[in-house]
Image: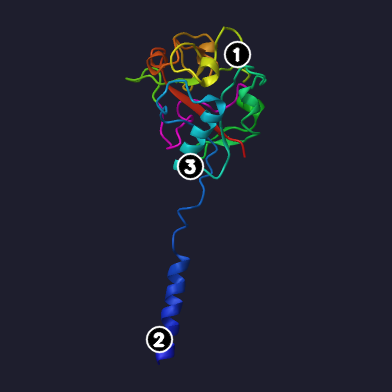
């Protein structure tokens, strides 16, 4: 009788185990997000490496740290290092947000007219919508330093806040995550190349409708 009772208990335990929820360590399939907050120094991220590390840290906080993450930023040639184009450092795609929506299937699709980047889909690592034009606080400026096709913008003396190392002087090109602008011109609706900021400090970035946020993409 005792052996039979033990067998019954073992069978019940096995059945309960099979119904247990999946481990919380399983990785999120998210491969694209907009940073929910700036780390605190305006456009100074410590260069591209620092911006990538910040994307990686936020991804890890959202259980997506098992991938390699890069910030969508271009930089200029400096100190013997060549210029870097944002489009060349984000992998091949496809990329999906925290809700599972595929925002682009490839680099060409991302920079084409049919990508799905907009206010509803350009979510943070937490799966939250970022406020944009028309909201009480406008945060739609996203730092890129890039042209519409994802290459380094050379249209002014500084378009990258000194290659993402300045929190004071300089300027950076930004895009609008909500694809909205002050008029109907196409550049103002660009997700990655809308206009320049008035400075590189948090106050300077806020003055044009931003909060020092980045686009982050999983490279693999």
Q: Residues within 10 Å of mark 3 (few under 14, many from 20)?
A: some
**SS of the residue at dot 1?**
loop
Residue drawn 42% across and 23% down?
Answer: 41
Label 2, label 1: how far apart the Cα atoms are: 74 Å
**SS of the residue at dot 3?**
helix
Q: In the picture provided, is 156 more to the left or to the right than 208? A: right
Q: Residues within 10 Å of mark 1 (few under 14, many from 20)?
A: many
Total residue callouts: 3
Q: Which residues are magenta?
A: 112-130
Q: Is residue 117 magenta?
A: yes
**SS of the residue at dot 2?**
helix
**Label 2 or label 1, whichever comes before in sequence order:** 2
Provide the residue designation for mark 2: 5
Q: Residue 45, image x and y in percent? A: 49, 25
Residue 198 to residue 10: above or below: above
Provide the residue designation for mark 3: 60
Q: Residue 173, image x and y in percent? A: 52, 14
Toward the left, the furthest residue is 136
Residue 164 to residue 2: above or below: above
| Observer-nearest of 192 and 78 | 78
Residue drawn 44% across and 18% down?
Answer: 167
Q: Which mark is residue 153?
A: 1
Label 3, label 2: how far apart the Cα atoms are: 45 Å
Give the main secondary structure, helix, strand or loop, of the magenta stretch.
Answer: loop
Label 1, label 3: how far apart the Cα atoms are: 30 Å
Q: Residue 135, image x and y in percent? A: 35, 20
* Quadrant of the rendering where the C terminus is positioned: top right
Q: Is residue 169 magenta?
A: no
**Label 1 or label 3, whichever comes before in sequence order:** 3
Circle 3/circle 2 CB separation < 8 Å: no
């Amino acid at each position: 009788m005792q052996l039979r009772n033990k067998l019954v208990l073992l069978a019940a335990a096995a059945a309960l185990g099979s119904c247990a929820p999946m481990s919380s360590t399983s990785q999120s399939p998210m491969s694209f997000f907009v940073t929910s907050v700036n780390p605190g120094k305006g456009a100074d991220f410590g260069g591209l490496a620092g911006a990538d590390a910040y994307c990686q840290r936020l991804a890890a906080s959202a259980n997506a740290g098992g991938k390699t993450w890069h910030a969508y930023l271009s930089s200029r040639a400096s100190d013997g290092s060549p210029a870097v184009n944002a489009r060349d450092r984000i992998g091949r795609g496809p990329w999906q947000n925290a809700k599972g929506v595929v925002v682009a299937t490839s680099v060409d699709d991302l920079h084409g007219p049919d990508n799905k980047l907009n206010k509803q889909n350009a979510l943070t690592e937490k799966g939250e919508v970022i406020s944009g034009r028309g909201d009480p606080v406008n945060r739609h400026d996203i730092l890129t330093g890039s042209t519409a096709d994802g290459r380094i913008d050379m249209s002014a003396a500084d378009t990258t806040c000194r290659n993402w190392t300045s929190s004071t002087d300089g300027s950076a090109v930004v895009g609008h995550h909500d694809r909205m602008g002050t008029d109907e011109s196409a550049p103002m609706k660009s997700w990655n190349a809308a206009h320049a900021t008035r400075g590189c400090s948090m106050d300077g970035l806020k003055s044009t409708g931003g909060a020092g946020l980045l686009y982050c993409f999983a490279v693999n």
